[in-house]
Amino acid sequence: MNEQSDHGSPVRNLSINFTSELKWLYYELFKNVPCLDSCYADLLNKLQENEHIRSSMCPDSDPVPAYAASPASGSTVPLGMVLHADTFADSLSGFESRIPYLLEAGVTFLHICSLPAHEKEEEIVRLFHACHQAGIRVCISIKTMFHSPAALNRTISDMLFFADTGADFMYPETLPGQRLKPSVLRILKIICETVRPSFRIVGDRSHSGIEMKYECSFLYTANLMSAIWNSVATGNVALLKYEADHCTLLPEDPLFLNYLRRQDLLNWDLDYAFLGSSGIDERVHRHFLNDFFTGIYPGSCSRGNLFHAGSYGTSSGLCGTTASFCGIEKYGFEGNRQGVSASVDLMLMLYALVFSLPGIPVVCSGDEIGMVNDYSYRRKKELLSDDRYLHHSRFRTDLAEKRHQEGTVPNRIFTMLMTLCQIRREHPGLFLSAPSWTLDTWSSSTLALVRETKAEKFIGLYNFSSETDVAWINEQDGPYTDLLSGDSAEAQGVSLPPYSFRWLLKSK
C-alpha cells in the first residue's frame, strides 16, 4: 500500500489520522481483492468531491448540529415512528402533506425506509426541510452492502447523499440474516465524524452480531423487543425482567430506541443461556414461538407468516403487524368483539411498557390505528415470494379517519397512545434518562418497572396473562396516583385484569 498517496491530492483536506485508519480498515476488509488500490482511490475522490459540494452549500447545511446525542431539548420528550416511504404515501409530496398527521401523533423522530438515493433530490430536500420545520428529525435506512469494495463505495455514496439532502441519521440496513461487520460500521462512523460531524448512525443492540454501542448514537433494543414477544407467547416475564434490568447497567450514551415492531422481521434474538438455566432448549423454543405467532399453536390468536418458511427450523424471522400478532386480525375476521377488545388490551399494555422504558419509544406506522396484515401482495406474481409485504402495506387512510370516531379500534388505540405521550411529557419520572429497575411481583406473569428522579417515583405494572393477576409488590411510601384514572392508589398487592397495565406515580 502506498501510504504517501493518501496525504496529497485529491484528499489534501482530509486529516492524516482519518485516512490512515480508513485505509487500514478498508484494506483489512477486502484482503486480496483485485484492483483494491483503484477502489480505494475512487472512495477518496468521492470524499474529496463531497467536501467541495459541502463547502458550496450554505453555512448551516449540516442539519441541526446540536442534535447530536438526543432529539430532546428542554422539556420535550421525543416519540419515534418508523415507516416505508413508498407505502405511507403515493409520492414525496403526498408524504409531505401528511406531516400534520405525524405531528398529531406526537412524532419527533422519523425513521424512513425504502427511500432511494440519488433520485428526486429536490423533493427529498424539501421533505426533510419540512420535517425539520415541524420539529421532526429524520433517520434514513440505507442498504449497506459490503460484499465487494465497489458495493461499500456505493453505500458510502448513498450515505453522503442523504447527509447532504438533510437527513440527521442513518440506519445501516442489511439483507435478512446478514450481519454487519464491525469494520464496516467503523468505516461509516469515521467518515461521518470527519466529513459530516452532525450526521449520526443508528444501530441495533442484540445478543447476536456485533457490539454497536461504541459507534452509534442510538440503538434499537432488538433483544428487549424479542423478550417482550416471548412473554406474550409464554405468559412468563422472567426473561423480560432480566433484560429490563440488564439495560440499566449499560452507559446512558447511546440512547435506546424501544419498539414492538419495525418494518423488518421479528427475530428471536433471545438470551438462550438465561432460558437454558430453566431447562429451555433453544431449537424447541424457537419452533414454539414460530408456531405461536403463525397461529399454529393451539389457543394462539396470532396471525403471522414465516419468512423463508421453506427451511422452517432456520427461518430468517416472522412477518406481520403488531395488531395481527396480538389477535385483532383473527377476532375481527370472526366478528368476535370480545376477542378484539382483549387483543386491543394486549396491544395497549405492550405499548404502555415500551413508552415507560428508558429511552425513546418508537411506533411502527399503522400500529397507532390498528392496521392488520395485508394479503393483497399474494395477487401480484412479482411480490408473491416476499412475505414481508404482509406488513409493508399501504397506509390505511380509512382507518386513520376513524381515529376520532368513538367506539372504533383506531380511536381506542390512537387515543390511548396520545394519552401516554402526554403523560410522558408531564412527568420527569418518565424522561429519557430517569433511572430504572424492576421489582419482584411474585407472579410469573406480571412485570413491575420503576423509574425515579428526585421529584417523582413511577411504577409501571404489566400483566401478560389472559387471567386477572396480582402484582405482590409492597412499596410502603404511598399513596400514589393512578396516572390514567387520577385516583389515589397504594403500590401494594395491586390487582390487574387480563392484559392490563397500571401507571402509578408519587410526587416527592
Image: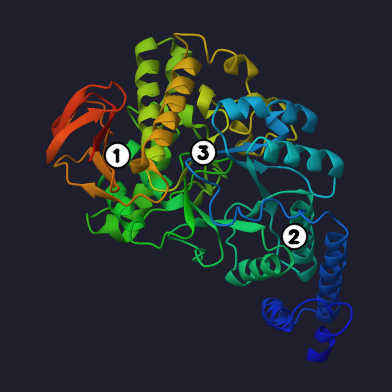
Residue name at image x 28 percent, y 58 percent: 274
Q: Specify whether 137 is left or right of 493.
A: right
Residue underneath mark 2: 155
Residue underneath mark 1: 234
- Expressed as whole percent of the image width and height from the top left, the position of residue 73 reads 53, 46
Q: In which quarter of the image is the C terminus?
A: top left
User: Which tag, 2 or 3, sits closer to the chain's start?
Assistant: 3
Kind of residue indicated by mark 3? Leu
User: Which tag, 2 or 1, sits closer to the chain's start?
Assistant: 2
Query: Alpha carbon of mark 3 to alpha carbon of mark 1: how far?
Result: 29 Å
Q: Specify whether 9 is left or right of 405.
A: right
Q: How crowded is mark 1: few (under 14 residues within 10 Å), some or many (20 or more)?
A: some
**Camera-side mark, 2 or 3:** 3
- Expressed as whole percent of the image width and height from the top left, the position of residue 261 reads 50, 39
Compared with 165, 339 (above or below) is above
Kind of residue indicated by mark 2? Thr
Q: Quadrant of residue 252?
A: bottom left
Q: Which of 331 and 353 is in front in this view?
A: 353
